[in-house]
């Protein structure tokens, strides 16, 4: 997957924040998301069917240290979004 495909999936699956945010690629299956006052990394694991959310240290804006915040188990409906008709199957 590309970072854009990862972002598109997380957006369609309603996993990203509902507040205003900016995002940028982090790895092929992870994106960095910044909201007012918080920084996160969302990592998609298709094998485990989960999204792990990591949160940055709020005391240091320059810190690249992220710790696990929570894990989201993907539902069958969310997994089906990866195989929408007319789109390639993502792996």
Image (cartoon, rainbow, N blue to C red):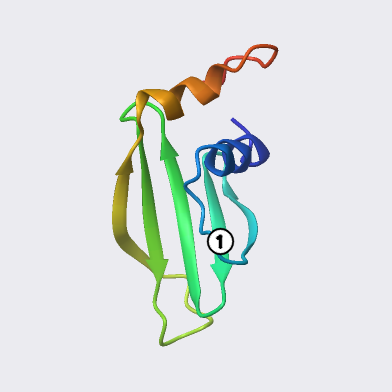
Q: Position of residue 46 (x, y in %)?
A: 41, 28
Is 59 on the left-hand or right-hand side of 67? right
The count of marks equals 1
Image: 9 above or below 19: above
Q: Residue 73 sits in which quadrant?
A: top left
Q: Nearer the viewer, residue 63 or 54?
A: 54
Q: Position of residue 77 (x, y in %)?
A: 42, 25
Residue at position x 55%, y 58% from top?
32
Q: Nearer the viewer, residue 29 or 89?
A: 89
Q: Position of residue 86 (x, y in %)?
A: 70, 12
Residue at position x 47%, y 20% from top?
80
The residue lying furthest to the bottom in this view is 59
Image: 70 above or below 10: below
Quarter of the image where the N terminus is located? top right
Q: Which residue is mark 1?
A: 33
Residue at position x 53%, y 25% from top?
81
Residue at position x 50%, y 70% from top?
39
The residue lying furthest to the right in this view is 86
The residue lying furthest to the top in this view is 85
Q: Position of residue 30 (x, y in %)?
A: 51, 46
**Label 1 packing within 10 angstroms: few (<14), some (14-19), many (20+):** many
Classify mark 1: helix, strand or loop: strand
Q: Residue 45 sits in which quadrant?
A: top left
């Amino acid at each position: 997957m590309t970072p854009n495909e990862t972002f598109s999936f997380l957006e369609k699956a309603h996993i990203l924040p509902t507040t205003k945010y900016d995002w940028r690629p982090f790895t092929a299956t992870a994106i960095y998301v910044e909201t007012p006052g918080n920084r996160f990394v969302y990592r998609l694991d298709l094998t485990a069917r989960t999204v792990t959310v990591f949160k940055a240290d709020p005391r240091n804006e320059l810190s690249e240290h992220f710790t696990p915040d929570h894990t989201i188990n993907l539902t069958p409906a969310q997994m089906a979004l990866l195989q929408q008709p007319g789109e390639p199957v993502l792996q």
